[in-house]
Image: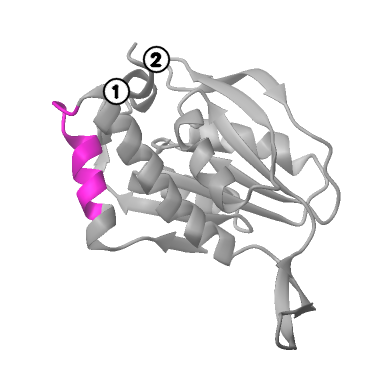
Amino acid sequence: MVTILQGTGLSHDVAIVRDKNSSLELFRNAVKRIGIHLAVEATKLLPGTNSTVTTPLATTEAIRISGSVVVVPVLRAGLGMLDSFLQLIPQALVGYVGMKRDETTLAPFEYYKNLPPSDSNTTFIVIDPMLATGGSMAGTLNSLMELPHSTIICCSLIAAPEGLMAISKGFPNVQLVIGVLDDCLNDQGFIVPGLGDAGDRLFGT
């Protein structure tokens, strides 16, 4: 299942992150706000359990998140969205997967992984601002698929059709939440029109 977001507030922040003249502060803050949009949609997909809660006036039905939630930012750019997700899911655990793309072959390789324990009731939420070729996301998902879990949700700020198709076909049970779907990839594997290198723009490198 793929969810592509819409809305004027979201579009405004997308314009900020696309603008090559946006300052580091503007860029970072816009990424965080877009992360909140993505996190809101992702939380709609979390498994829930029916329960009750007692208010000062009465007892009423309620729904609570089932099982544990592990947010997995793909290093390094995924860190720019992490706080947004923890604001909405403060009880979430955090795991890290480091994926680096070979700029010649465009193939990703994993250089770091540190994930908390999971079980059959765990939901993984993978966050990475850019879904370009889909290679880094696929590598991360392959690592997570080996672990016990119930649900996997992937969230990206901008996606290329090529990456979206690759993940949808390769991982049909994974749910995708995308801020905006762009036109294509260029010969270097960058999303067009895109926003450039998200990691470089987030960290000033």
- Could you say where residue 190 lies in the image, as x and y percent from the top left? 30, 29
Please tell me whether residue 56 is drawn above or below residue 48 in the rendered image: below
* Distance of label 1 from label 2 (alpha carbons): 8 Å
Q: Residue at x 35, y 27 (%)?
A: 198
Q: Indicate whether 115 appears above or below 108.
A: below
Q: Amino acid at mark 2?
A: Glu
Q: Amino acid at mark 1?
A: Gln
Q: Which residues are magenta?
A: 11-22
Residue drawn 40% across the image and 40% down it: 32
Can the viewer see residue 148?
yes
Query: Looking at the image, is mark 1 or mark 2 earlier in the sequence?
Result: 2
Answer whether residue 39 is magenta in the image.
no
Up the image or down, 56 lies above or below 150; here it is below
Whether residue 21 is in magenta: the answer is yes
Side of 74 relative to 17 (left or right): right
Q: Which mark is residue 149?
A: none
Relative to 102, 153 lies left or right:
right
Q: Residue at x 21, y 24 (%)?
A: 23
- Please name whichever residue, 36 or 104, is drawn nearer the observer in this view of the structure: 36
Residue that numbered label 1 is attached to: 188
Task: Give the structural element (helix, strand or loop) at label 2.
Answer: loop
Secondary structure predominantly adopted by residues drawn in magenta: helix
Name the residue that disc number 2 marks. Answer: 103
